[in-house]
Amino acid sequence: MACDVDGTLLGPTSAVSRRTAAAVRRVVAVGVPFILVTGRPPRWIPPVVAELGHGGFALCANGAVLYDAAAERVVEAVTLSPRRLLELVELLDEAIPGCRLAAERPTRSARPEPDEFVVELDYEHPWAGPDTPGVPRAELLGHPAVKLLVRHVEMTSEAMAEAASALVGGAATITFSTSNGLIELSAPGVSKGSGLAALARRLGVAAPDTIAFGDMPNDLPMLAWAGHGVAMANGHPSVLAAANEVTAPNTEDGVALVLERWF
């Protein structure tokens, strides 16, 4: 079982409901791996693991990072080099004039590390939370990153992705998990689907034996790779169209409804 976190596993209060947590525990109890597959970095995984009561593997940063929650360590990470970041940003400035940047850098665990998330001066977060001090662009691009975040407050994520794709091409994987003016770039070929495929090989699980849950376009590669892709009713239209099945929204325990058929 492979499951997105925000908008899928988590309910309206950004927490795992009792019903969903109970269903996941039944899955794990019979030896079926339950994998969190998320755009989140490792530092945002421990609260979810605590609510599930299950510390297995998590694929973070849209498949770029494999995190072992039980051992509390990052197993491996695929990064964008400083040179590649600079090349991408030159293209992004042409494709999306006025965009601002942030970067998730590789870490060793979920414990806080200095400069693990850096933002450019004038970067505006698309979500509520504490402000992060900005740094000059040259400093932001001077270290490897598992994910480059690109923000434009006057555009939708869909429009940004279309404009960026036209110039970036195969130089990076472009996706998004919100429509609120934010796209995310990973190393070429890196996605939730590629990360899940690699982890499944490690675990000895085949694609036809995998069920995946998601709600946004960054989940599409994962849903396509899995034997059975399940979209949340609250999902993006592209996800609803691509899935094998549509379950109830995350506000109504859509993941649990599917798991309870078998467990």
Image (cartoon, helix red, strand yellow):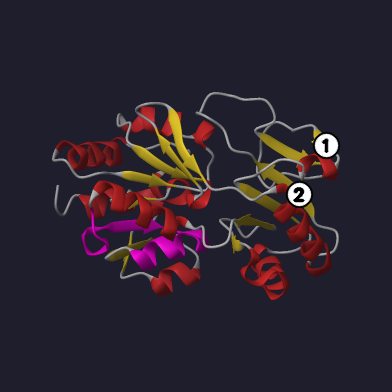
Q: Which residue is mark 1?
A: 135
Q: Is residue 153 something that shows in the picture?
A: no
In the rendered image, residue 71 lying in the magenta stretch gets the answer: no
Q: Where does the magenta region start and end?
A: 205-225
218 is higher (above) or lower (below) than 204: below
Q: Is residue 10 something that shows in the picture?
A: yes
Q: Position of residue 164 (x, y in %)?
A: 71, 68
Mark 1: few/some/many CA within 10 Å (<14, 14-19, 20+): some
Give me the residue at 79% from left, 69% from top: 95
256 is higher (above) or lower (below) than 164: above
Type of amino acid at the residue the image marks with label 1: Val
Q: Position of residue 149 (x, y in %)?
A: 68, 51
Residues 94 and 198: in front is: 198
First in sequence: mark 2 or mark 1? 2
Q: Is residue 178 left or right of residue 221?
A: right
Give me the residue at 85% from left, 64% from top: 97
Residues 114 and 26: in front is: 114
237 is higher (above) or lower (below) than 260: below
Residue 73 disc label: none
Q: Quadrant of residue 21?
A: top left
Q: Which residue is mark 2?
A: 101
Q: Is residue 251 left or right of residue 148?
A: left
Q: Position of residue 258 (x, y in %)?
A: 24, 55
198 is higher (above) or lower (below) than 155: above
Give me the residue at 81% from left, 61% from top: 90
Q: Position of residue 78 (x, y in %)?
A: 54, 48
Type of amino acid at the residue the image marks with label 2: Leu
In the rendered image, residue 212 lying in the magenta stretch gets the answer: yes
For label 1, the SS is strand
Mark 2: few/some/many CA within 10 Å (<14, 14-19, 20+): many
Q: Quadrant of residue 92?
A: bottom right
